[in-house]
Image: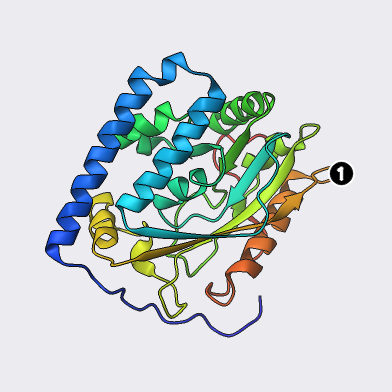
Amino acid sequence: MSGPPPAAPRAAASTSAATRAWRLLRVVVHVLWGCAISALVFPWIDNRRQLRIIRNWSRGMLTALGVKVTVHGRRPSTRVPILLVANHVSWLDVWLVLSVYPVRFVAKSDIRGWPLVGWLVARAGTVFIERTRRHDAARINQHIAEVMARPEAVGIFPEGTTTDGTQLRAFHASLFQPALAPGVRVAVTSIRYPLADGSPNVDAAYSGDRSLLQSLRLILAQRVLRAELSFLGVIDPAGKTRRELAQESHALIARSLEPWIRRSPHGTAADPPGATP
C-alpha cells in the first residue's frame, strides 16, 4: 500500500453537559420505542415492512446521537442476494448501513448481552456468531445462505473486530463461503468517521480497551459526528475462491481508506475456529 502516512488523530469539538444529557435522553427513549415496535408490531407485519421500519429507526438513532451521514457511490440492487462487506470501526456502523440499505448483519454474540440494545438488534434479524466456539462458522454460513435465498442482503465485518479507523486488518475468508452460491454478489463498502479537517475521528471508534459506556460518552460529547459510507462496487464471485473474494474486497476498501490507514498486510487472516474448509 502506498501513499502518504495517515494524519495524526485529533480531538473533536465537544458539547455542553446539557447537550450530552439531552442526547442521552433521546437515545434512551428511542431505544425503548424500538423495543416496543419490535415486540408489538413486528410479529404482525411482513419482512419488507420490517426492513423499512428498521431503516427509519436507524436514521432516528443517528439523529439522536448527532451523527451526520454522507453516502457515496451506487447502492447495490435489492433484487439479488447480496453479501455486503465492510470494515468495522464502531457500534455505530450497523445503524449507519441500516439507515440507507436493508441488510441482516452478522455480529459477535456478546452484543446480544447489551442492555436493551442487544435484544433490539436480535429482533432486527441479526445473526450472532460464537467466535470462540468450534464449528460455529459453518452454522452461520448455513443461516446466511438461507437468508440470501429469499433473497435478502447479509452484512459481515470480515476483520472480525473493530479498529480505530486508522488501520485495516486482514479479512477472514471463512465468512465469504455463502458468496460462492449461484447468483450471489459481493457488495464492498467502506466506513469512516472524519473530523471537519478530514483527519480520522478516533473518538468515534469502539476498539481496544474502550468500553461501550466510554464509547457512548465520547460520541455524545461531539458537536457533530461525521460519518461517511462509500459503496465501492459489486464483485461477481463466479470462478473465484472465498480467499480471492476476501483479498479483492480488502484491496478495494484499503484504497478507499487511504491515506488514513497505516501500512498493513494484504490478504486474509487465518480462519477462526470452526471455519469451513
> Going 41% across and 60% down the picture, which residue do you hit?
68
Q: Is residue 91 above or below residue 220?
A: above
Q: Amino acid at mark 1?
A: Gly
- Label 1: how many Cα within 10 Å (few below 14, some 14–19, many 20+): few
Q: Residue at x 50, y 33 (%)?
A: 52
In which quadrant is the C terminus drawn? top right
For the N terminus, the image quarter is: bottom right
Whether residue 269 is visible here, answered yes or no, is no
Secondary structure beneath disc 1?
loop
Front-lying residue, 230 or 90: 230
Residue 90 position in % (x across, y down): 41, 55
User: What's the residue at 25%, 59% (across, down)?
Assistant: 220
Q: Residue furthest top?
A: 44
Position of 160 with respect to 143 (left or right) is: left
Q: Percent position (x, y) of residue 214?
A: 24, 57
Q: In this view of the protein, can residue 233 be seen by the observer? A: yes
Q: Residue at x 19, y 58 (%)?
A: 20
Position of 190 with respect to 195 (left or right) is right
Q: Residue furthest bottom?
A: 4
The residue that label 1 is drawn on is 239
In the image, residue 102 sits, relative to residue 71, either above or below, namely above
Percent across and percent down for residue 48 are 56, 26
